[in-house]
Image: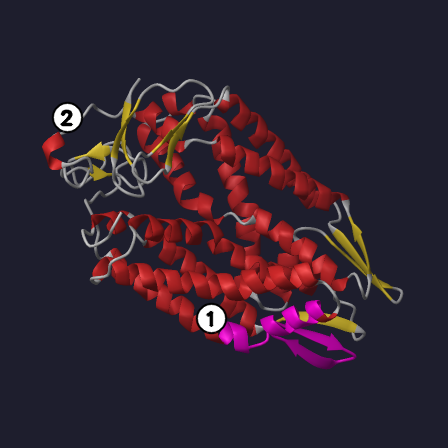
Amino acid sequence: MEIQLACHHCDQIVSIPTLSYGEHAYCPNCHTLLSRTINARAQKVVALSIASLILLFSALLYPFISFSNQGLSQTINLLDAAKILFYQDNFFVAALIDITIIGLPFVLLTLFIPLHMGALYVLPKPLSRFCLKTIYYLKPWVMSEIFLIGVLISMIKIMAMAEITFGLSFWAFSAFVLCYSLTLYYYDSHSLWLQLADQNKIAIDESLGSRAKNQNLRACHVCQLLTYDDTCSRCNSKTSVRNTQHIQWVLAFTITSLICYIPANFFPIMHTWIFSIDEPSTILNGVFTLWQIGSYPIAIIIFIASICIPIGKLFVLFWLCYLVTKKQHISRKQAARAYVLIELVGKWSMIDVFVVVILVSLVQLGVLMSITIGVGAIFFAIMVITSMIAAQLFDPRLIWDKKRFSE
């Protein structure tokens, strides 16, 4: 069955024929992946989702990591990270940890299983829409894989001063991250939306151009349905040819992110207490410490993720907003690649917050040594969240609307 889509990056209308297994369909204009077929996709998603849920529950039941220093030891499970932060009155970071690494994956996996077992054919349409839209809005905020990398980096930071033992929960969580990543690889939202309603064949007037905007068509940002109406008939989302007010929102969140970035780098991200003496540490202090002890690769990773990526992402967002509102000659493809890049790397800046969270959870040895989270970590987490929202609000189709852009 042939389907019609408007590329969500450049607005090019593409007619995609029935694909054989293993075939991929790309936008002929900007080369964005539009569709792909995988043999036994639904069965693979269900199997991997069940395996992911089992591994996630296993990761909650057993010891995660043990820390020993001078005869004193501390063992934590996966839930203890947020629990200790709650005891220290860091409610925002504690909730962020539990939601992004446990809560959201659980919700998504429990939705994947029935939806890929044919539930969309029997559920009431309003409930089906709600389930699919929930997946759409929550999926970008899962950070389990970033947390796992943060755990490994934090272990490298403290192995020099203590003995570290990985518990069964750590290996279960590592396997969960792998299975969850494979689940997302096989998941295809468009095939599920097609179970609710097919795309009606729309006649295209070639003389007006091949983009949806030229045909006065609206491409639903949630389910990709092409329509002339203000409301998508398939998912009930509001549609528009372009929402130019989004630029103001993008700028507002980007400026907020920039404002938070300044105190995030100047205030301590954590406090190390040794015999009740406070040794505060900023992000740059942590990078310098790793470099001095010879952990050059980890120091470089933290520097890139915590310093280069955030400021680079903010610069690109300001640059893109300027390009689509002012007269500036630039390659469309160059601008589009910049947007794709900030979409991919945005949430990885959270890695430094997760490193601090693990250190705070593990190093609680009373008067001898303890670590508490600093206000810089809170500002940094807010900076990452607001920059992610800004990137999601930016409409890349605006890049391809401007005649002043070159090919």
Residue 122 visible? The answer is no
Tell me: 405 left or right of 128: left
Instruction: Check the image and report above or below for 93 versus 27.
Output: below
Mark 1 lies on residue:
261
Q: Secondary structure at mark 1?
A: helix
Tell me residue 137's x, y (percent).
Answer: 40, 45
Neighbours of disc 1 within 10 Å: few (<14), some (14-19), many (20+): many
Disc 1 versus disc 2: distance between alpha carbons?
Answer: 49 Å
> The disc labelled 1 sits on which kind of residue?
Tyr
Mark 2 lies on residue:
203
Tell me: 64 left or right of 192: right
Magenta stretch, residue numbers: 263-291
Q: Secondary structure at mark 2?
A: loop
Residue 186 numbered tag: none
Tell me residue 213's x, y (percent).
Answer: 17, 41
Instruction: Check the image and report above or below for 92 versus 222.
Output: below
Q: Which corner quadrant of the image does residue 203 belong to?
A: top left
Is 271 magenta? The answer is yes
Q: Among all residues in the image, which is located at the extreme bottom?
A: 277
